[in-house]
Amino acid sequence: MNNTLKTNLNECISEALINDYLEGTLPQNEKDLIENHIAHCDKCLVKIIYCYETYEEFKSKTENKTMTISKIKSGTKNIIWLLLTAGSFFLSFFIPKHFLQFLTLGIIFAFKWIFESTNAKILVMIYDAWKQNDRLKIDRIFSKKGGRF
């Protein structure tokens, strides 16, 4: 947003200008004028504090929703691999003409399902550290996951 700052200290700062100030998009001279104004105007200081707290609360809620959505997506992906595994396994018995093809497909999907999960990746990391006799690395992996899978 392109807002011009009024240099008159008696006029309060607009919400749009406060937004630009909090986002850090104002030039330094305008930031200085705003800071000088809020040093003398309790009303604008309260507005800036309220806007900042609201912005931080919104940002934290948005981050939490993004993390939740990514967890749902990864969980859905694992369920799809599991369903494809089970479906191709059962099809191998119901369509005897293509038994080996469906069974092979089921095995491929099963491996995909196993190795897409986070726990499998952690186990591989622990196995590699164990092969290297690196107890420190194993402890770091466990501490990152809270000691549980």
Image: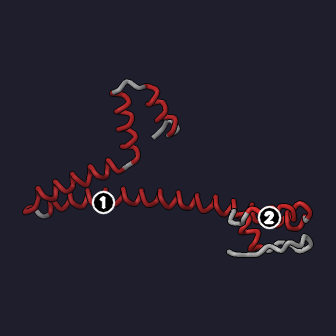
Q: Quadrant of residue 28?
A: bottom right
- Residue receiving disc 1: 83
Question: What amino acid type is highlighted by mark number 2?
Answer: Ile
* SS category of the residue bearing label 1: helix
Place of residue 48 in the rendered image (x, y in percent of width and height, measured from the top left): 80, 64
Mark in front: 1 vs 2: 2
Q: Is residue 56 left or right of residue 30?
A: left
Q: Residue at x 26, y 49 (%)?
A: 111
- Foreground pick, 136 / 19: 19
- Residue projecting furthest to the left: 97
* SS category of the residue bearing label 2: helix
Which quadrant: the C terminus?
Answer: top left
- Residue receiving disc 2: 48
Q: Is residue 115 left or right of residue 11?
A: left
Place of residue 51 in the rendered image (x, y in percent of width and height, measured from the top left): 76, 65
Residue 46, compared with residue 119, is above or below; it is below
- Foreground pick, 6 / 47: 6
